[in-house]
Amino acid sequence: MMVDTILPDQYRPAEDEPFMNERQRAYFRRKLLSWREDLLGDSKSTITGLQDGTRNIPDVADRASEETDRALELRTRDRQRKLVAKIDAALRRIEDGEYGYCEVTGEPISLKRLDARPIATLSLEAQERHERREKVHRDD
């Protein structure tokens, strides 16, 4: 279990600090937990809205439009559910001391990349190689 580090609100990880020190781990943990909380709050409001929003609409076009909106909302929530799973995995990596390191190379992932995408598991170079290979196989 990680020891809670008190972190000032204005703290941002810096390149001149030791990589994934206690403050950086606390920063990314706080960022991930906040993101997760926002997503779960959105999901709860969607569920409530879908339950309350069941209406009998006589106009076929209006009903089709509402069904399309609901399907889109459910698809968005499914993506967010998968994102919550990735956030949970990132939080486990923080606890295990593996967070911030590329799964392929073992090298540190840049702080800028982690700040932009805190669930990143690959360095920028490894991600680019992965996407190039994926594109080549997709074109076959």
Image: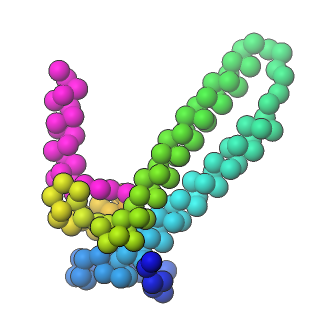
- Horizontally, residue 96 falls left or right of residue 102, namely right
Query: Residue at position x 60%, y 35% from top?
Result: 74
Name the residue rendered at 16%, 36% in the picture: 133
Q: Is residue 41 on the magenta stretch?
A: no
Query: In x, y percent, where is residue 27?
Result: 42, 75
- Report the coloring of the rendering: rainbow
Query: Of residues 98 and 29, which is closer to you in this image?
Result: 98
Total count of labels: 0
Residue 94: image quadrant is bottom left
At horizontal 35% and vertical 77% (from top left) the residue drawn is 24
Q: Position of residue 21 (x, y in %)?
A: 31, 81
* Main secondary-structure element of the magenta-colored stretch: helix
Q: Quadrant of the C terminus?
A: top left
Query: As drawn, is 58 to the left or to the right of 2?
Result: right
Give residue 130's quadrant in the image.
top left
Residue 108 in the image: x percent, y percent?
Answer: 21, 67
Residue 76 vertical placement versus 61 (above, below): below
- Verify whether residue 137 appears in magenta: yes
Quadrant of the rendering where the N terminus is positioned:
bottom left
Q: Residue 137 vs residue 73: left or right? A: left
Residue 109 visible in the shown view: yes
Q: Is residue 115 visible?
A: no
- Residue found farthest to the top: 60
Magenta-highlighted residues: 119-140
Place of residue 87 in the rendered image (x, y in percent of width and height, measured from the top left): 45, 57
